[in-house]
Image (cartoon, grey):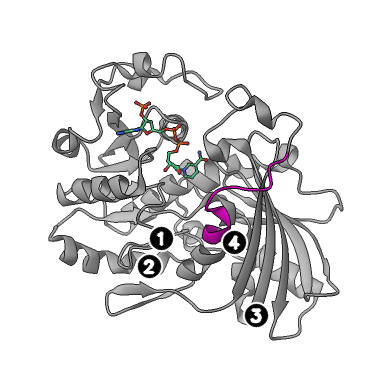
Amino acid sequence: MRKCTVGIVGATGMVGQRFVTLLENHPWFTITAMAASSRSAGKTYEEAVAHKWQMKTPIPESVKNIMVFDAVKDVKKMAALVDFVFCAVDMPKDEIKKLEEEYAKAECPVVSNNSAHRFTPDVPMVVPEINPEHIDVIPFQKERLGTKKGFIAVKSNCSLQSYVPALHPLMDLGISKVLCCTYQAISGAGKTFETWPEMVDNVIPFIGGEEEKSEKEPLKLWGKIENGVIVPATTPSFTAQCIRVPVSDGHLAAVFASFDKKTTKEEIIEKWRNYQGEAQRLNLPSAPKQFLHYFEEDNRPQVNSERNLENGMAISIGRLREDTQYDFKFVCLSHNTLRGAAGGAVLLAELLHAKGYLG
Ligand code: NAP
């Protein structure tokens, strides 16, 4: 099988670097083009990331000499070189929206990490284990854009990639309301302890825009396609508090949930252990074998021991117990820059490829 050629828009950033490392030996995708800001354009990738490479493994040889394009000015050049692009750029939202549409209109599909298009009604926001059927909205989006091949698909915010997977297998119990508090790593802000020393020995009780995303995005994930757009679900009701904690990688969530139907702890754990999504059924290369792992120990999941489970793509859950205000409470954990960012986008691209949307 011919490998799909891939471009990374925002290749020099934190998420962009993750894409580069994740795709190094990918069985289906190979990086053939890179783009970033005008500051990096015209340099080789190695030169452009010389002082900001943050991955634990070295820059892959195969990309070191790729010449970095200007993500905004060189859309057509990028589109001519690749089957599709991953996009993770730090720009104002309206500029990202426009940029991603320009790539799509240049007949270059965009798999995006950015939040700009998450609420565009005909743009699917997909977690492959949860709502793979939402990619069926793409033909309607192409019609609006006037494209044959180009479209935009996005992944959801990193904060909810632990608790929505845990809640999803419980939907048939009729989840009526959810309260969650997230404890989020500094890499979610594109930072390390070196670049954000104020976070050492500190907790910040505010992450701009995060609580709104954490409450609103799950409802789009659980929405339905109607008349060519995704209509968000109206239940369950969500309330969230999002807190920045001194952790490098790994978002933890403490979740409280109530159900319309009576249930037991054993039944919930059974549903988690048995759950398989489309990513597992299709055996996608980046899919975890077991999506949800339940831990019986009172002191797990922990960020350090569980965040890298199944290459950082699995979700860890623990401490399920009855609650006095809600029916049940539990904690869950996911790797924010793997499952929550680049890894989640690669898995989405694999789903799109398996369903014939790329290349
Ligand atoms: P970052 O480390 O600041 O990287 C930003 C990238 O955007 C760099 O490649 C940068 O190029 C490029 N860029 C900046 N201004 C540009 C411009 N005017 N034109 C073209 N390219 C420009 O940011 P990040 O943490 O990777 O995040 C990227 C996106 O992913 C953001 O939308 C963020 O919200 C989202 N995201 C991040 C995470 C996470 O865990 N970090 C998780 C989910 C989603 P230069 O190097 O040339 O400046």
Q: Secondary structure at mark 4?
A: helix
**Mark 2: few/some/many CA within 10 Å (<14, 14-19, 20+):** many
Residue 150: percent from the left, percent from the top? 20, 53
Tell me whether circle 1 and circle 4 mark residues in contact (CB < 8 Å).
no
Left/right of residue 268 with respect to residue 24 in the rendered view: right
- Residue at 23% over, 27% down: 69
Tell me whether circle 4 and circle 2 mark residues in contact (CB < 8 Å).
no
Tell us which disc is closer to us: 4 or 3.
3
Disc 1 to disc 4, C-alpha distance: 14 Å
Residue range corresponding to the magenta coloring: 203-213
Q: Which residue is label 4 attached to?
A: 165
Left/right of residue 348 with respect to residue 189 in the rendered view: left
- Residue at 45% over, 66% down: 131
**Mark 3: few/some/many CA within 10 Å (<14, 14-19, 20+):** some
Which label's residue is closer to the chain start, 3 or 2?
2
Please state which of residues 318 and 35 is positioned toward the viewer in this rendering.
35
Is 13 magenta? The answer is: no
Q: Which mark is residue 125?
A: 1
Disc 1 to disc 3, C-alpha distance: 23 Å
Q: Amino acid at mark 2?
A: His
Tell me whether circle 1 and circle 2 mark residues in contact (CB < 8 Å).
yes
Residue 255: percent from the left, percent from the top? 71, 63
Residue 272 seen by the camera: yes
Q: Amino acid at mark 3?
A: Ser
Q: Which mark is residue 176?
A: 3
Q: Amino acid at mark 1?
A: Met
**Mark 4: few/some/many CA within 10 Å (<14, 14-19, 20+):** many
Which label's residue is closer to the chain start, 1 or 2?
1
